[in-house]
Image (cartoon, rainbow, N blue to C red):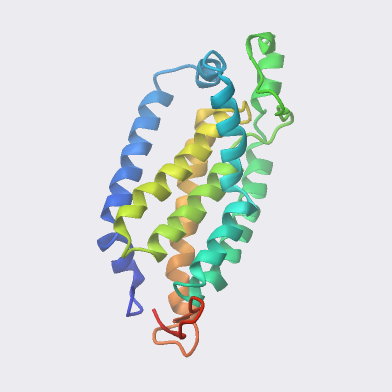
């Protein structure tokens, strides 16, 4: 756990595994992005439909929604109070950044794009999932939310280094789900991932300015049943 007010040193030093894997994800995503045509990733997944894949991505995409935030709010109560206080602001920032960027870029969703290209009949939809229309594709809000959440959690649980890759995998799968479910393009997902990670790092660092170490209550934690409260 961080015991000083210099998190900028902490978020890299104790999370190298996460950031190396994240960088590899961006590199791989960038290579694929510049090697294919717009919409090819969606067409690829459309041809790989299966009942198990449809069910998995239909439900796992919710890991980037409020369900994921509420779950980790409960978990972080047993770590320290400070990330619990800050996490709602992570979600609020995602909502604001997502709304602003979508409004600025106003890119068509895949359903609208393929319809305008007279190619919508090539897409096999996922049963039970409606394809969003409109000009709100770039960037992916779900992906931004997932990377903000899981980056922040990975930094807050830096002493659990083996879990950092699990958190990253969860964020990546949320991003993949947005392509699989025909809601976003690959470029939407990659950009959402970068913005989300930046938001997670921003709030992780800011919390130590807002609540410097040591803090009378922010560095305490909720005890398990029959336990005692103490410092993390």
Residue 103: image quadrant is top right
Residue at image coords 44%, 72%: 79
Residue furthest out toward the front: 226
Residue at image coords 48%, 49%: 147
Residue at image coords 71%, 27%: 131
- Residue 140 in sight: no
Identify which residue, 42 or 195, lies in the foreground.
42
For the N terminus, which image quadrant? bottom left
Residue furthest out toward the bottom: 216
Above or below, 109 against 83 in this view is above
Above or below, 227 against 32 in this view is below
- Residue 25 in sight: yes
From the top left corner, tell me how far across and down residue 57 is, in percent: 57, 33
Identify which residue, 14 or 136, lies in the foreground.
14
Numbered-mark total: 0
For the C terminus, which image quadrant? bottom left
From the top left corner, tell me how far across and down residue 76 is, in percent: 49, 68
From the top left corner, tell me how far across and down residue 161 is, in percent: 30, 57
Identify which residue, 84 or 200, lies in the foreground.
84
* 182 on left or right of 17: right
């Amino acid at each position: 756990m961080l015991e000083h007010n210099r998190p900028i040193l902490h978020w890299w030093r104790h999370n190298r595994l996460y950031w190396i894997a994240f960088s590899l994800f961006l590199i791989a995503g960038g290579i694929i992005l510049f090697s294919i045509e717009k919409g090819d990733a969606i067409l690829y997944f459309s041809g790989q439909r299966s009942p198990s894949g449809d069910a998995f991505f239909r439900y796992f995409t919710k890991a980037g929604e409020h369900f994921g935030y509420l779950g980790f709010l409960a978990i972080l109560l047993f770590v320290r109070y400070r990330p619990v206080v800050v996490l709602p602001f992570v979600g609020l920032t995602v909502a604001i950044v997502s709304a602003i960027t979508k409004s600025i870029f106003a890119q068509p969703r895949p359903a609208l794009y393929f319809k305008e290209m007279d190619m919508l009949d090539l897409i096999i939809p996922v049963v039970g999932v409606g394809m969003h229309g409109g000009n709100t594709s770039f960037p992916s809000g779900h992906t931004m939310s997932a990377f903000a959440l899981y980056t922040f959690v990975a930094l807050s649980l830096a002493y659990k280094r083996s879990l950092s890759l699990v958190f990253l995998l969860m964020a990546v799968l949320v991003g993949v789900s947005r392509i699989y479910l025909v809601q976003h393009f690959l470029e939407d997902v990659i950009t959402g991932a970068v913005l989300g990670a930046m938001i997670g790092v921003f709030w992780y660092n800011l919390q130590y300015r807002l609540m410097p170490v040591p803090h009378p209550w922010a560095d305490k934690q909720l005890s398990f049943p029959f336990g005692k409260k103490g410092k993390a």
